[in-house]
Image (spheres, rainbow, N blue to C red):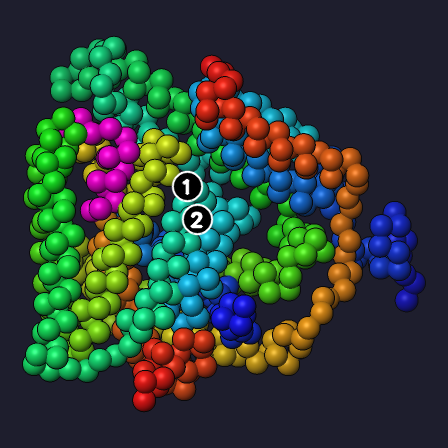
């Protein structure tokens, strides 16, 4: 219980409403100002999870979706039923925070490219589970270009990991990208049944085009929703994780250390 | 100062401008009752398969909207569902897997009756859900709901997080617009190719997050100065009206909804 109460210190309680507001406002801004087919509505959730812990992160995610759905004047849309998915994202972010994934690891040479190679291999293995799976080549269920498109997404993600690690000279970029990709895959698995059975696979956003393309190929509702999730969620969560990582790296150590997982983020516990 | 007549004895000694009890046939109900009604409507709309669930919810919501006199104010909530409804109708009608009951052949487009039925059912569920959200939002001020939940054991931390989040959102929307304008003046591209727009995310998200953390520090000190983490429960001044009848209705709604959903999902009771 002490582990649980530490996640809800006054500072974390003060951070949570701000994080919830950031989720809603950034998600809205990305879709209306930048007009990008990604969500970016989990930045605050991952922020709280990494700084405070899994339960605080999960609650931030769940409350973000419920407030966005029901609050007067700003409510509406289809975000409410996905509160469970947001909770899972916050839970995973807390796990990555506990493991110190977002801790800076300045490195060069083998110390830098070793973790990058591991991250790239894991991303490509995840993609290969789709690319090599006969289900995703079955013309009755998926369009012919789907598995190739997943492979392209994996290659682009891997290249982004390598570039980010090289530019920042920081091996943590590899682990952050891996954490983002894994979070995206889990989020896709969690959101597909909700999207399929509650909204018939569509949510009114730009990603409905992917669902339509998969349905055109003959895919059923659940697999179309899952296919769309595997496309957009890993990209979205990887970008989100990188944004959180860059912002955390720019904060002062004194500020970060005040949060429950702050010292783990700074690496002070192992010093 | 003369203390005005109190609110029908619900909270003796508390003046009316503090108590501020909601009035109206539906709005005057306990906020927790309205919350339970909203959740059960959402659950029935989405989890009772077929036409019966969403149609029943639409009828109930329409009735409560008329009683509460919020019908016209619900229009923006319904209009907000139009993009989703359009997606649902198009994708399901023209791309419903396995359907062979063709309505017509319009070049490459082949709408089917099965797809249209599925589309209309899904549309009805979405509209029913949107209407239930609208009625709840328009008849239940957030402060009233949180006060009532705190009295029922929510805790000051939960009450603070929800209330502060709802109040912070409008300010943060303004700040986001200011940050976007400032970054556009510094060359941020929000209209160009997709890869350039993606690069604009960090220049907007970064300042928002760092300025938000500064606010967190100030707010933490303000909360601690007001004994936020002191043990014990706060005294709730505003006691919102409730009754044994409303409590019974809440329990009946929760249990009844649970039974209906289980019966529908397991096929024990088949409804059209």
Q: Residue at x 37, y 32 (%)?
A: A197
For numbered disc 2, what is the local secondary structure?
A: helix
Q: Residue A83 carries which label?
A: 2
Answer few, some or many: residues within 10 Å of disc 2's Cα (few below 14, many 20 plus, some between 14 and 19): many
Q: Looking at the picture, do discs 1 and 2 lie on one chain?
A: yes
Confirm or deny contact between disc 1 and disc 2 (CB under 8 A).
no
Horizontal and vertical percent position of residue A47: 38, 67
Q: Is residue B230 above or below residue B261?
A: below
**Host chain of mark 1:** A
Q: Which of marks 1 and 2 is nearer the N terminus?
A: 1
Q: Residue A56 carries which label?
A: none
- Comparing A22 with A185, the one in front is A185
Part of the protein shown in magenta? A216-231
- Comparing B159 with A204, the one in front is B159
Specify the quadrant that holds the N terminus of chain B.
bottom right
For numbered disc 1, what is the local secondary structure?
A: loop
Residue lying furthest front? A1
Q: Is the magenta stretch mostly helix, strand or loop?
A: helix
Q: Which residue is drawn at 22% across and 19% down?
A: B98
Horizontal and vertical percent position of residue B57: 55, 27
Which residue bears the numbered disc 1?
A: A78
């Amino acid at each position: 219980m002490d582990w649980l109460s530490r996640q809800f210190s006054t500072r974390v309680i003060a951070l949570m409403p701000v994080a919830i507001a950031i989720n809603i406002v950034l998600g809205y801004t990305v879709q209306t100002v930048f007009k990008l087919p990604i969500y970016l509505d989990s930045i605050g959730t991952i922020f709280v999870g990494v700084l405070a812990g899994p339960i605080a992160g999960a609650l931030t995610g769940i409350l973000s979706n419920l407030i966005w759905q029901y609050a007067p004047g700003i409510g509406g849309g289809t975000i409410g039923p996905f509160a469970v998915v947001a909770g899972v994202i916050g839970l995973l972010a807390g796990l990555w925070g506990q493991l110190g994934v977002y801790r800076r690891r300045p490195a060069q040479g083998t110390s830098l490219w070793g973790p990058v190679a591991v991250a790239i291999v894991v991303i490509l293995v995840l993609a290969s589970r789709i690319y090599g799976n006969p289900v995703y080549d079955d013309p009755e269920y998926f369009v012919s270009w789907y598995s190739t498109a997943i492979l392209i997404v994996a290659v682009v993600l891997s290249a982004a990991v390598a570039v980010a690690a090289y530019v920042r000279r920081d091996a943590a970029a590899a682990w952050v990208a891996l954490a983002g990709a894994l979070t995206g895959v889990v989020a896709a698995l969690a959101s597909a049944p909700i999207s399929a059975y509650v909204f018939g696979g569509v949510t009114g956003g730009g990603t409905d085009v992917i669902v339509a393309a998969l349905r055109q190929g003959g895919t059923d509702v659940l697999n179309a929703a899952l296919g769309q999730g595997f496309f957009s969620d890993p990209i979205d969560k990887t970008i989100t994780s990188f944004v959180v990582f860059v912002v955390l790296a720019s904060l002062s150590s004194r500020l970060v250390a005040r949060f429950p997982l702050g010292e783990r983020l700074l690496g002070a516990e192992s010093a | 100062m003369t203390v005005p007549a109190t609110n029908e004895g619900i909270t003796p000694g508390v003046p009316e401008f503090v108590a501020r009890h909601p009035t109206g046939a539906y709005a005057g109900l306990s906020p927790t009752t309205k919350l339970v009604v909203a959740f059960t409507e959402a659950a029935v709309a989405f989890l009772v398969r077929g036409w019966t669930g969403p149609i029943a919810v639409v009828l109930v919501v329409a009735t409560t909207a008329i009683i509460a006199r919020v019908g016209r104010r619900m229009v923006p909530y319904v209009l907000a569902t139009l993009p989703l409804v359009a997606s649902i109708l198009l994708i399901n009608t023209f791309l419903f897997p396995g359907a062979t009951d063709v309505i017509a052949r319009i070049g490459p487009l082949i709408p089917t009756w099965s797809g249209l039925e599925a589309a209309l059912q899904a549309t009805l569920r979405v509209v029913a859900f949107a209407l239930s959200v609208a009625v709840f939002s328009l008849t239940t001020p957030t402060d009233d709901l949180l006060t009532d939940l705190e009295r029922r054991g929510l805790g000051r931390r939960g009450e603070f997080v929800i209330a502060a989040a709802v109040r912070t959102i409008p300010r943060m929307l303004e700040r986001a617009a200011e940050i976007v304008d400032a970054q556009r003046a510094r060359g941020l591209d929000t209209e160009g190719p997709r890869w350039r727009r993606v690069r604009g995310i960090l220049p907007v998200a970064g300042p928002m997050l760092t300025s938000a953390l500064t606010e967190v520090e100030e707010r933490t000190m303000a909360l601690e100065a007001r004994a936020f983490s002191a043990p014990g429960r706060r005294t709730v001044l505003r006691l919102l009206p409730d009754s044994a009848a409303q409590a019974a209705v809440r329990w009946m709604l929760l249990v009844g909804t649970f039974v209906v959903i289980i019966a529908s999902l397991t096929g024990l009771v088949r409804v059209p």
